[in-house]
Image (cartoon, rainbow, N blue to C red):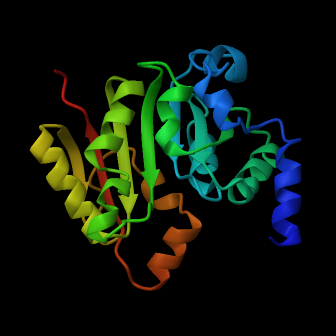
C-alpha cells in the first residue's frame, strides 16, 4: 500500500465529515440509524445517498447544486473519497458527509423511509454471468434500496455501460417499477427534462475518462412500485 493511501486513511480518521464504522458496529444497531438529520446535519432536509461514490465528485457537486438537501457518499474505499471529503471541507459544505462501508450493509445504517433519493454513478457493470448478483441494479440490491427509501423516493443510475443500462431497464420493467426517464446519451441530445443541468455539469473522474474515449453516458430515473 502506497504512502499516499496510508496518509489518506490516517487523515480520514480526523476529518469531521468522514464516518468509518467497523462491521461489528454496523451490525449492532448503528448509532446514526434513523438519526442522520438530527445528529449529523442538524436539520430536517431530504437525505440523498450516493452509492459507490468513488472520489466523491458527484456527492460534492450535488451538495453544491442543492444546498437544501443532505448528501451521504458511500464507498468502501476511503482513500478515494478522501478527495471529496477534503473538497467539501475546503468549500465549507456542511450538507455532505462520507460513509465508509459496503453497500450490502445499507439497511444497517438507515431506517425504513429515511432516504429520499439514491444515486448510483458509474458502477462496475459486472458483465460476466457469474457476477450477476454483484450488479448494483440486481433485484437483491433493489430490495435493499427499497427498504430505506421513502415511498415515491427516486433512484438515479448514470453509467457508460449500455449493457448495464439495458439490463436495468429490463429488470425494472419485469418487476413493475416505474421508469420515469431513460436516456441513451445525455450529452448527444437537447435538454429532455427541466432542471437537469447537473446531469451534464457534474462529472466524476470516470465520466470524464469514458467521455474522452467517445463512450456515451446513459441515465435512468425510476421509483419503486407501491405494493
**152 to 168, vertically: above or below:** above
Give coordinates of residue 115: x percent, y percent.
Answer: 46, 26
- The answer to whether residue 49 of the structure is visible from this angle is yes
Q: Is residue 180 left or right of residue 195?
A: left
Q: Residue at x 75, y 54 (%)?
A: 82
**152 to 143, vertically: above or below:** above
Q: Quadrant of the C terminus?
A: top left
**131 to 119, vertically: above or below:** below
Q: Residue at x 59, y 36 (%)?
A: 71
Q: Residue at x 83, y 35 (%)?
A: 16
Q: Quadrant of the N terminus?
A: bottom right
Q: Is residue 63 left or right of residue 196?
A: right
Q: Is residue 94 left or right of residue 154?
A: right
Q: Residue at x 38, y 63 (%)?
A: 159
Q: Looking at the image, which is closer to me, 177 or 141?
A: 141
Residue 214 falls in image quadrant? bottom left
Q: Looking at the image, which is closer to me, 53 or 65?
A: 53
- The answer to whether residue 189 of the structure is visible from this angle is no
Residue 128 falls in image quadrant? bottom left
Give coordinates of residue 107: x percent, y percent.
Answer: 47, 29
Give coordinates of residue 183: x percent, y percent.
Answer: 25, 59
Give coordinates of residue 219: x percent, y percent.
Answer: 32, 57
Q: How many marks?
A: 0
Amino acid at each position: 500500500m502506497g504512502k499516499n493511501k496510508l496518509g489518506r486513511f490516517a487523515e480520514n480518521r480526523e476529518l469531521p465529515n468522514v464516518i468509518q464504522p467497523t462491521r461489528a458496529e454496523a451490525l449492532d444497531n448503528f448509532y446514526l440509524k434513523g438519526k442522520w438529520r438530527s445528529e449529523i446535519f442538524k436539520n430536517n432536509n431530504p437525505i440523498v445517498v450516493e452509492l459507490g461514490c468513488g472520489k466523491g465528485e458527484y456527492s460534492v457537486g450535488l451538495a453544491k447544486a442543492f444546498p437544501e438537501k443532505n448528501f451521504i457518499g458511500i464507498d468502501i474505499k476511503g482513500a478515494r473519497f478522501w478527495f471529496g471529503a477534503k473538497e467539501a471541507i475546503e468549500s465549507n459544505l456542511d450538507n455532505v458527509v462520507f460513509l465508509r462501508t459496503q453497500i450490502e450493509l445499507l439497511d444497517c445504517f438507515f431506517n425504513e423511509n429515511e432516504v429520499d433519493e439514491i444515486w448510483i454513478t458509474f458502477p462496475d457493470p459486472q458483465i460476466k454471468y457469474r457476477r450477476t448478483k454483484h450488479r448494483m441494479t440486481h433485484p437483491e440490491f433493489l430490495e435493499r434500496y427499497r427498504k430505506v427509501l421513502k415511498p415515491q423516493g427516486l433512484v438515479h443510475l448514470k453509467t457508460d455501460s449500455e449493457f448495464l443500462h439495458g439490463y436495468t431497464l429490463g429488470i425494472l420493467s419485469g418487476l413493475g417499477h416505474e421508469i420515469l426517464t431513460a436516456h441513451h446519451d445525455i450529452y448527444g441530445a437537447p435538454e429532455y427534462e427541466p432542471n437537469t443541468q447537473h446531469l451534464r455539469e457534474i462529472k466524476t473522474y470516470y465520466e470524464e475518462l469514458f467521455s474522452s474515449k467517445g463512450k456515451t453516458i446513459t441515465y435512468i430515473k425510476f421509483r419503486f412500485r407501491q405494493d
